[in-house]
């Protein structure tokens, strides 16, 4: 996503592509590759659909992020988040309709409803507001680069939670990710 945001933003003249941004994005993406591929890379046909879906997600998130950047002068982050939710929910409900109709709602526990509430309010609404505020404050490139930290954070959390020991290659990847993020902040 950071590379797509930086390149697309430059082509569309939404963001400037500086050497510092290119170097920072390159370092961070290299770090992500080390962290993720240390556990193994699978290029078999069994995974191609998932890879295509993930590429579609990256393109969609790039379009969204650059769209937020272009709207940030005329709309508040809360307004952009509201419109995102209002326009996105109907499509998601349509896609989920078969599962919604076949769900035994009476069997959903209090914990299940609490999880849904948490996901809706914190993960979605608060996450979008923070993202949109960041795009407005520091730009698309400097916001998108933080996405590179996700595999690093997942690796660090997997260590105490499920006992997965990080490797030295992942440590080098982590250093590259942090270096890339810090470099793009300049």
Image: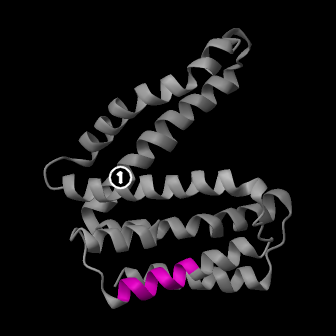
Q: Nearer the viewer, residue 51 or 116?
A: 51
Is 55 on the left-hand or right-hand side of 151?
Answer: left
- What residue lies at 80% left-to-right and 62% top-to-bottom? 160
In this rendering, the answer to whether 46 lies above or below 115 is below
In this rendering, is residue 169 above or below 69? below
Figure quadrant of the C terminus: bottom left
Residue 141 in sight in this render: no
Magenta highlight: main SS: helix
Scheme of image coloration? one colour
> Percent x, y for residue 61?
43, 54
Residue that carries the numbered disc 1 in the rendered image? 64
Residue shown at the point (13%, 50%) measured from the top left: 74
Q: Could you say which is closer to the camera, residue 132 or residue 99?
A: 99
User: Which of the 4 image quadrants contains residue 39?
Assistant: bottom right
Q: Residues within 10 Å of mark 1 (few under 14, many from 20)?
A: some
For the magenta stretch, what is the residue range?
20-29
Residue 28 at x, y = what percent? 53, 79
Q: Is residue 21 magenta?
A: yes
In which quadrant of the rendered view does residue 21 lie?
bottom left
Residue sitting farthest toward the left:
74
């Amino acid at each position: 996503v950071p590379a797509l945001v930086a390149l697309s933003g430059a082509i569309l003249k939404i963001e400037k592509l500086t050497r510092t941004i290119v170097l920072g994005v390159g370092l961070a993406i290299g770090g992500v590759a080390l962290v993720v591929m240390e556990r193994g890379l699978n290029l078999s046909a069994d995974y191609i659909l998932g890879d295509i879906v993930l590429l579609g997600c990256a393109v969609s998130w790039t379009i969204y992020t650059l769209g937020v950047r272009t709207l940030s002068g005329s709309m508040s982050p809360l307004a952009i988040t509201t419109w995102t939710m209002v326009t996105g929910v109907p499509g998601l409900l349509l896609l989920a309709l078969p599962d919604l109709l076949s769900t035994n709602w009476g069997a959903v526990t209090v914990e299940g409803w609490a999880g849904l509430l948490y996901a809706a309010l914190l993960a979605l609404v608060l996450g979008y507001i923070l993202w949109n505020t960041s795009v407005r404050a520091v730009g698309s490139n400097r916001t998108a680069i933080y996405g590179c930290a996700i595999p690093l954070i997942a690796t660090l959390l997997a260590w105490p939670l499920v006992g997965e020991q990080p490797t030295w290659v992942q440590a080098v990847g982590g250093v590259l990710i942090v270096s890339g993020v810090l470099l793009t902040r300049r």
